[in-house]
Structures are given as C-alpha cells and as structure tokens.
Image (spheres, helix red, strand yellow):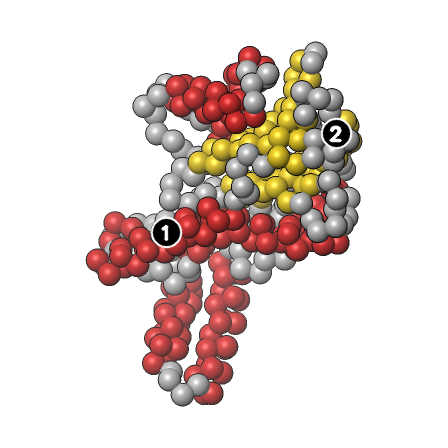
Amino acid sequence: MMEIDQTALRAQLQDRKQKLQVAIKTVDQTENLTTLLREVDIALEKIAKGTFGLCETCHDSIERDRLLADPLVRNCLDHLTAAERRLLERDLDLAYQVQRNLLPKSGVKIDGWETAFHYEPAGSVSGDYCDLIIPDGAGNAFYFFLGDVSGKGIAASILMAHLHAMFRSLLKLSQPVGELLEQANRLFSEDTMLRYFATLVAGNADASGAVEIANAGHCVPLLVQKGGIATISTTGLPLGLFHTVEYRSQRFTLSAGETLVLYSDGVTEARDGSDNFYGEKRLTGVVWKNRERPPHELIHACVDDINGFRSSAPKADDVTLMVLRRT
C-alpha cells in the first residue's frame, strides 16, 4: 500500500491555511472559517509531531482512504461520535448516488455494436472507472474506458469521478487514443496533494468494426475471435506514476460476432475460501464457453462463475466487466 506523502500534504494544508486567513479578514460570518482554520492547524501540528493519521481515541491508524479524502479527520471509524457516523453515512449515500449517475446506460447499442457492463463496488462506493462516450460530431464512432484507481473507498471514488470528467473534456480535442492517454496522464500526475495512479484501458471503435486501443498498465483485454481468444498487451505505464509517458495504441478490425472483453483486477484477483485466485485462465474459459451468448448474458455467466468460485469468501475488491460485441 502506498504511503501518504506528508510533505505534499503539509504544503497543501499550509496553502489552505493562508487562504482561510485571507477569507476570515474579508468575510462577515467567520465562525465556520475559524473552526476550519483550527482543524487545519491541528493537522499541521500532528504532521510536525509525527502523529498524523493516528486516531485520537485509540491511537491506532485512521483508515487511509478517509485520510486521502479528508486529511482533517481525527478518529478512526470505530471511534466516531454518533453525529459523525450519521454524517459519514449521509456522505457515503450521496457518493453512491453520484457514482451510479456517472455510469453509462446499460445495454447501449451503437451502429454495428452491442455493449453491456457489470459494475459492483466492494463497499459503498468504487474506485473502478467504466464509461462509453459518443462525442459530438463523431458520427458512428464511440470511445470506451475501463480502469481502476489505486486505493478504495471515498478517496478512490472521488478520483474515479475525476477520470470521468477529465476524459469527457479531453475528447473534445479528438486526439488518437495514445495521445489521449498521454494528455490524461499529464493532468492526472499534476495532483499536488498526494500521489495516486490509475490503470486503464481506453479505445475507440466505429461501425466498420475498426478498433484502436491502448492499455495503461491494466488487466489485459480479451479479444474473442472465431479461432480462439487473444489478449491485448499493455502499451504503457499506469496514469499518474510519471509526468511524461508515451502510450502506443494497437489497431485491429472485428468481424461480426467477435467480442472484446474488458475487466478490472477485482475479477481475476477474486479469492475463494482457501485464498486461491480466480485468475485470467478461468475467466478466459468462461468467456469462451459463453462466447455466442448476447453480451449481457455473457457478463451474467462470468459474474455467476466468479460468485460461485468465491462462495462464502468476502469480496475484497470492486468487480467491473465490459463486453463490446461487433454485430
């Protein structure tokens, strides 16, 4: 697990402190601002003392995803007050509703293509990113994305929403997929608070069956053809690790009945009660066995097999699948 960058965090909190001090001098009602300034000072003091991230009640570590989302939190989940619990539950419910509204429509049919997806958070919200976009003026072409942000919980869901907004803005520039990922990587890596990364598969397709795709460190997509299943290799590093990364795209054409399957690592890294991984080999077998079924039925077959494999073992990660079928 990646540690919190307290140097960057300190700089961010100091910047917030300066802005609050200016605001207090210019705003009439300053009670809330003064309280917030005091919370920022407490967080800075903890960083200086080396106690940042420790619960004030039990002195154990506060959940990392909560610190990433709000560096001013002072207690772990086990020691929240009743009011804090109600506020957290409200925030989680709101985050869930926002995230569901960011997902594409189910069962979208685009000229020459049928699509389906399954999106299942491990908790209240997910760090997986799943989207289908038909840009204005693109005719019969569309873009598809499936990715996974580092971490879990609220912080990861915020970054998932950030990716959603970022790609929808960048697509107005109509770059090739490789250039699109390079621009997205630069924007993502400029986060000044903390260092995150995201694995991602991005591509576009049109009515002729032509596909351009690039893989930024994500699980290898499955290309289901008449003669068998091929995998599409990684063409670059995850987004956010380095400011400048080159991404190569691959091009191919799907014939009628051929299918592209994308998935997150919550699929292949699902575990059974004996701690065995589900794995890419088992997924490939299920996909091949059900390759002639409609996209939504193919996804249901995969999800049923994953759940059967996991049985009573807890779900440890978000599970997302997307199927694109050339018609």
Image point (32%, 56%), residue name: 90
Number of residue marks:
2
Between the C-alphas of marks 1 and 2, the distance is 40 Å
The amino acid type found where label 2 is placed reads Gly
Residue 9 in the image: state x and y as whole percent. Answer: 50, 61
Mark positioned earlier in the residue sequence (1 or 2): 1
Q: Within 10 Å of the Cα at label 2, are there few (<14), some (14-19), or many (20+) other Cα atoms?
A: some
**Of 52 and 107, the residue lying toward us:** 107
Eye-nearest disc, 1 or 2: 2
Secondary element type, mark 2: loop
The amino acid type found where label 1 is placed reads Leu
Image point (67%, 20%), residue name: 257
Left-right relation of 313 to 205: left
Please tell me whether residue 31 is drawn above or below residue 15 in the rendered image.
below
Whether residue 327 is visible to the viewer of this picture, yes or no, is: yes
Q: Which mark is residue 77?
A: none
Q: What residue is pinned by disc 2? A: 209
> To which quarter of the image does residue 105 belong?
top right
Q: What residue is pinned by disc 1? A: 92
> To which quarter of the image does residue 202 belong?
top right
**Of 103 and 185, the residue lying toward us:** 103
**Of 10 and 131, the residue lying toward us:** 131
Image point (32%, 23%), residue name: 312
Whether residue 231 is visible to the viewer of this picture, yes or no, is: no
Image point (34%, 25%), residue name: 313
Give the position of the C terminus as an image quadrant. Answer: top right
Please tell me whether residue 114 is drawn above or below residue 90 in the rendered image.
above
Residue 290 in the image: state x and y as whole percent. Answer: 55, 16
Residue 243 in the image: state x and y as whole percent. Answer: 69, 52
Please tell me whether residue 298 is drawn above or below residue 106 in the rendered image.
above
Outermost residue to the left: 82
